[in-house]
Structure formats: structure tokens, C-alpha cells
Image: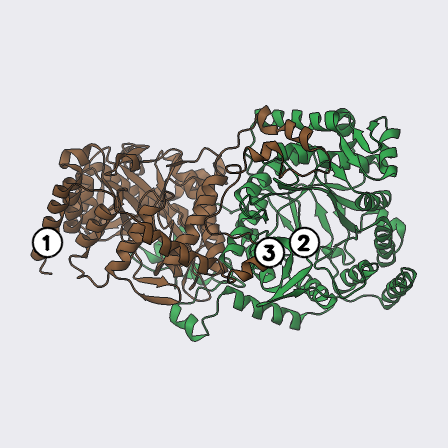
Chain colours: A brown, B green
Amino acid sequence: MFVNTLPRYEILTEDAMAVLDKGWRRIVSEIGIEFLLPEAVEQFRAAGQTVVDDNRVILDPEFVLEHVAKAPREFDLQARNPERSIHVGGQHMAFASVYGCPFVREGDERREATMDDFENLVRLSQAFPELDSPGGTICEPNDRPLDSRHLDMVYALQTLSDKPYMGSVTSGPNAADTIRMGEILFGGREAIEATPASISLINVNSPLRYDDRMLSALMEYARAGQALIITPFLLMGAMSPVSIPATLVQQMAEALAGIALVQTIRPGSPVVFGSFLSNTDMQSGSPSFGTPESALGLFCTGQIARSFGLPWRSGGGLNSSQTVDAQAAYESLMTMLPTFLAGANFVMHSAGWLEAGLVSCYEKFIVDIEILRQLRHEFTPLEIDEASLAFGAHEEVGPGGHFLGAMHTLERFRECFYRPLLSSTENFERWQKKGGRDATARAAEIWRATLEKYEAPALDDGVRAELQEFVVRRRRELGD
Amino acid sequence: MFVNTLPRYEILTEDAMAVLDKGWRRIVSEIGIEFLLPEAVEQFRAAGQTVVDDNRVILDPEFVLEHVAKAPREFDLQARNPERSIHVGGQHMAFASVYGCPFVREGDERREATMDDFENLVRLSQAFPELDSPGGTICEPNDRPLDSRHLDMVYALQTLSDKPYMGSVTSGPNAADTIRMGEILFGGREAIEATPASISLINVNSPLRYDDRMLSALMEYARAGQALIITPFLLMGAMSPVSIPATLVQQMAEALAGIALVQTIRPGSPVVFGSFLSNTDMQSGSPSFGTPESALGLFCTGQIARSFGLPWRSGGGLNSSQTVDAQAAYESLMTMLPTFLAGANFVMHSAGWLEAGLVSCYEKFIVDIEILRQLRHEFTPLEIDEASLAFGAHEEVGPGGHFLGAMHTLERFRECFYRPLLSSTENFERWQKKGGRDATARAAEIWRATLEKYEAPALDDGVRAELQEFVVRRRRELGD
């Protein structure tokens, strides 16, 4: 996987960090956080925290920090193919596909996503080494019953890919199903408790509220020692004030409170400081992605998460565009380049995100893979030594010469530069003769060819049968 | 103009800098640099440097550094409208339009550029405050005679815009014409010698060679104290070895030698360390822009130029794409975001660049303006204090609430976030109802509307007449 050893880009001064630190302490201790699940409230009450109005927990910041400190700074996440296991934290960056989209886009067609789309997008995620995980709900399989589709999704993630995956968070029982299927795939409870076999996304119902479904999933996963990403869901102007500093402070209050809850349930359980921070377009009232504000949020959030010794999640190929055009591309890179500069440890939505996250797009998937490939190359350190200066090449070529035929070039031309997957440098005449296809049209060819070449990773027949049996039984129990 | 007070992103260690420093010294002192103009060679010989093979100058690195040190660290560049004058160096960043393109693209039409295009692109450069200068050869006016078109271009730059402009570098006499026209516009020789009224691009005929036309222009401008950008023209694999460190070293050798020449002609004359560094696509053999290599070049070049106390030029909206698609956008931002991170002082090709620089494109111009607007916002420091934390808004809204109607939001909604020029956040249905136009189609509307609203900046009738008279006379003298 990718290890980002280049410097981090940090813009917060020590004074600014001190102001922010005071801010989250004030929120948790003066306003508090709502937890809409009695079990979670009890957890805090038992740990000595004050509860008001039934479900609002007033937190002592020192209590929060004491528990946050129990979370591991870095942890491993198992894949069923050990070569695909990943490390979360430090200089490591893991990339997962888009998550949570009700629609798909394929060329000019935009439609409700189906299970076929889900499977295809998992196959694409498996095929590209730039992705460490297909993620989880890569699109919503709307043709499957709502109550049991989590089973179909987890089964597809487990069988069509051998990379780590994300679990269901739609309820406690669904989380329990994910865990049970992990036990089957990885050989029992002990195997997945020793090293987590899933990572799941708990969104805060911001501002300052955790809802009951997410909380019951959180508690289920935490008890099993499965990794969690605790993510305040912050579109400034809707779920947080129209101020980046205010939103950073709210993000700290919400995330740290959730992380503390996980640590009260199972100290040392792996957890990630999550960030999903952008703004409302105050003209259209719609969410806006790939904005300067979200880039600033990334720079700051990385610095903040590191100050608490926590791995962190954010970034991706986010954009608001309705189609795979110039806007989709510049907004996505406006998020992804800062993601690398800020050194995010777990990057959701790394491939396929379109239309403010409503759409999983096949062509955009390929555009994003190209961007990821470029950035991985860009954030690989240069080796600078005497030999790299190629003085001999200058002696060979001399003033006014050309390096294309030089010995130094011939020995290195295959590996010396980044080689594009999608981008074209063809001259205009040649490009036109070949059909004059733009990047989106070329991307369509690439994803189709990739699916054609896809081979499912091998899986033990017994394990597969046991997974199938579990899915069939649970589906029946759920009445679907 | 824009002042970038955010931190610089620097990736070279002290050890790496020491290796690079040895490298350029070895090139200038062991191989030397060719100057294909006897006058330039004499300049070096008179200053005690060794000349071999008639025009190759073997340079003492200490001599080079001694002269480089005479260049100002920062300088002002006059505009005829004093409010539009710019400062080059330090934390200041100046942005100029695309330069040198033989073709234009307008929608789906690609054609030879004309004087009408030249004028329209200057008008667009004047209209957008994100651009500090229209640049110079914003496209080649192919419908004007080759010998005298520099007069048409300078006249258009001087009259259709009141921002600083770039001069002709196609020969010494053409440079002299530019200077004379500057004297007319700014009120005499003294006025432009006190503060330069033009900045001109001297490209090195890399590797390690300056040609006679560029050198004669260089000497003309240097004598008049007009600003110069000395730019090694480096596409790795063609004009330099297939190695970034080797190319950085060559860039230092070439640029510093040219800067030293300027300083022997007129010590203290304003000069900019130029960089134009990308790579050949080793598969197509074509130049490749917006690559990871060029981003790395930007990070390194900024650090290197600062180490010599010189303002520097590089960056822009560079890309290899044939059309205004996703590739054009991600490659452009892959150059422009690093340009900001590296703090380039003078940024050519900031708007309009397409197809590896062969094309000035109207729609791309608008895409680039949007990118510039976003980045200027992104690289504006956050104000983080108690008030910015908006604690009152949290008290007002409370857990689970919504901030859209909050007093804090209502008081700030107009100014709180970046407001796009081109990007759309409209929901799919609304976007589709309005025609489903992608960013490129919307950009076409924006540039047309901008041209319609354009008003030429006022100019004294006497000055205009004198400029016209000069152009007519010189054109006659040149036989056109």
C-alpha cells in the first residue's frame, strides 16, 4: 500500500491550535452531545459523566482525552488475502471506493443503482491496485429488499474481492450480521478480534447528535473489536456554523466524544478520527464539494487528528458536478491533492464519486484511478545523489543536442516517468483520426475492458457455502 | 494582487540541496554554456570568463553567484494604470494569460489564431481581476505579417488593457520597438528605467545554449533596465536527461548563467529565475504537461530560486489535452495547485492553455479563471479567534438543529464561502431542465458575456496617436 513519506502541509499555528482546543472543550462541557440510544447514555453515566434531558451527555474534556488516549495510534486491518491486508495510521494511506450512492451513471445514462452495478463496481475496485478496499455501500442495490440487502452487499464484498471491506451500519443487527460473516470468512471470532476484519463508518447526525441506529451498530462493532471510523457529517451552513474554525471545533467535539464512547466499551479498540467537511452553496442551497473550504478543512483536520495521536479519515474525489466534465475533474483533484498533502490515513470516495455523492459513476471511477496513480507517483520521494545528476548524459549530448537517443535515456525510458492510464498526449491530427474521443469516452473503454478481464479471487468452497447458507437463512428470518 | 502568506511546500533536504548545488557548478565549469551571439560572449570574456570553440563560455561558479547576487530580490513592474502595477517577488504572485499559441479553440472549432483572437483574449485578460497581466503573445496573429506583428501585439496590449504586459523577444530590433512604445506610453526613457514597464521572456535553447535572437533581445532589454524572465525550456527526455535531479541542476546552470549575463550588462536590473519543466511522454514522444514530474519540479524550483534570493516564474494551467475535458482540468490543477504551494512569483499560462500549449482556448480560459479564483480563496489564511468559533450559534441551534436559518448564518451568508463563477451545484433535475450543459458549455456563455460587457480602459488621445504613428512608421520601415 501507499506510504506517504513526503512532508505534511500544515497551516495552523500553535496559537490557532490552542484556540481550537478551548473550543471543543467548551462545546462538550457546556452544551454536550446527544446520544439517542439509552445503552450509550448509560455507558457514559456509568463512567461518571453527567446526563441532562435524558440523552444529552455533558462531558468532562479530561475524561474524553483519557479515553481517546486508549485508542491505538495505528492498527492493521485484515484482508482474506494477507497480501492485501492494510495498515491504518502513521504515514500509510489506504484508498477505498465511493460509498452510499443511490444512483449510478454509465455514459449518458443516469439510473437507480442495482445489485449488478454493485457487483461491477466491486470488481473494478478489486482490479485496480490503486484501491486498497472496495469500501462498503459502493452503490445502493435498489433492486434488493431493504431489510436484507446488507447481506447481499457483504457477500459480494467478501467474494468478488479479497481486499478489506466496510461493514453495514444501518442497525445493530445488521452490524452483527457483518461480524458473523467476518467470522465465517476469517475462521472464527478470535481471528477477527485479534486483528479487525472490517472497518465501518459511523456518521454523526450533526450537529452534536448520534442517532440510535448508528449507535447500536457502533456498540456492536466496538464489542467485537472491529475498526470504526467516527465521522461528523458537516456541511457548513446546514450541520455546522458558516465558519471553518467553528466547524473544526464542532468536528473535534463530536468525533472525540464518539471515540471516547468506543473506548469505554472496549479499551484499545481500533478507531479512526473521521472528517467529512464541506459547505453549502449559499446561492443554490445545495451541498458543494471540491471547494477551497474543504481543502482548508483537510489541511487543518490532518494536523488536528495527529495532535490527538489518532489515524484519520477524509478526502476522496469529491465534486458536485452532474457529469464527468472539467468541473468534476478540477473539484475532485481539489480534494484529492490536499488529501495527499494532509496525509489522510483512510480515504473513502477515492473512485467513482459524482454529483455530490448521489451517483456512483463508471467513467468517473477511471478518471479517479488516473488521478490516484498520478498522485502516488507525485508523492514518492526523489532520490537525489551524484548518479541522479546524469553528468555523463550531458557530456554525451552537449550544448544544443537532444536527449531522446542518448544512452542514459535508452537505458531508462520505460520507467523514468509516470505512464498514464487515461490521459492522452497524442497530437491533434492523430487524436482526431482515432475518433477525437475525450477523456470520458476513453474512460468508458477502460472500465469495460477492465471488467472483461476481471477474474474473481479464489475462495474455499466450504467457506463460500457457509456464507451462502448464512445469507439465505438470515434473509428468511428477515422476511425477504 | 495576490499575496500568498500560507507556508511553502518544500521537499528538498539540506543534503539534497548540497548535491544539486555541486551539480550546476560542475556543468557551468566543466561543460559551459553556449551563447550564439558574439556580443554576449564578449561580455563574459571581458568579465574574465574563459571562452572555448568561439561561443562556449566556461563559467566560474563564484563569478556567477557574485553577479546573481546583484539582481534585486523583489521589484515593481509598472502598469499604465498605477492601481494595476504589480510587485514581483517575496510572497507576491502575479498571474498572466497563456503565451505563444499558434492556434485557438472556440467551442468545437480549432483554427489558426488571428489578430481578432489576440484582441479578444487581451480583452478577457483585462476583464478578470484574477489576472495581473494579459502576458504577451497570447496567441499568434497569423493574419498579420511576420516581420511587423510584434507592433500590432504590443499596441493591442497597451491599448486594450491597462495591466503590465510582456514584450517582444523575437529579435533585438523588435525588443527595441517594444521599449520605444513603452517610452511613449509611460512618458519617456527615464520613467521606464526608474521602474520597468515591461517584462519579457527569454527562453534558453536548452540544453546549455542561448540563441542569437533571444540574446539580442535580452541585451536590448537589459540595457534599458526592463524586467526579464530567464527560462530554461526543459522537456525531460528531449532537452534534458530523463531525471528530475539532473534537470533541476541543468535548470540552475542555464538560468543562473543568463541571469549573470544580465547583471554584467546592467547590475541591479530586474530579472526572474524562470522554470518551464515537464517531460516527454516516452510512449507517444509528445510533450506531456500536468504530470507528477512537473509538480515535483515546481516544489523543487521554488525552494531553489529562494535559496538564490531570486523571484521565480513557473506554473500555470498546463495540460496536454486536445479538448476542454476532464483531462484538461485535472492536469491544469495538477500544475496550478503546486504553483500556489510552491509560491511562484510570476505565473505565465494562467488562463487559456490547451493542447500542450499549441492552442489558446476561450472555454479553457474560463475554466482556468475559476481554478484561480478557488485557489486564491484556498490560500487565504484562516482567522482563528474566539469569535470565529461561533459558540453563540451552537447555543442558538442546539443538538440536531439546522444552521441555515440561524442568526449567525443570516448575518454572513453572502460572504462566508467561495462563490463559483463556473461550477454548478444545481440538483440533477434542475440542471437537466436548464439544458444539461457541462462546464465547457457554460464557460462558452461566460466568455461571450464577458466580451460583451468589456470596456476599453481610457487612454490619452495624444498618446494613442503617437503610438499609432510609431506603429505605422515602423511597419513601413519593415516593408509590411
Mark 2 vs mark 3, CA separation in Å: 18 Å
Q: Residue at x 78, y 27 (%)?
A: B59
Q: Do the dots labelled 1 and 3 sit on one chain?
A: no
Location of the C terminus of chain B by quadrant is: bottom right
Mark 3 = which residue? Answer: B355
| Residue pointed to by mark 2 | B96
Residue at position x 46%, y 74% from top? B435
Q: Are marks 1 and 2 on the same chain?
A: no
In space, the residues marked 1 and 3 are separated at their CA atoms by: 55 Å
Query: Disc 1 marks which amino acid?
Result: Val
Q: Residue A73: image x %, image y %? A: 32, 32
Residue highlighted by disc 1: A472
SS class, disc 2: loop
Residue A153 shows in this picture: yes
Q: Position of residue A223 (x, y in %)?
A: 17, 39
Q: Tell which of B223 and A30 is nearer to you.
A: B223
Q: Residues within 10 Å of mark 1 (few under 14, many from 20)?
A: some
The part of the image, by quadrant, that contains residue B16 is: top right
Of B424 and A117, which appears nearest the observer?
A117
Query: Hey, what amino acid is under mark 3?
Result: Glu
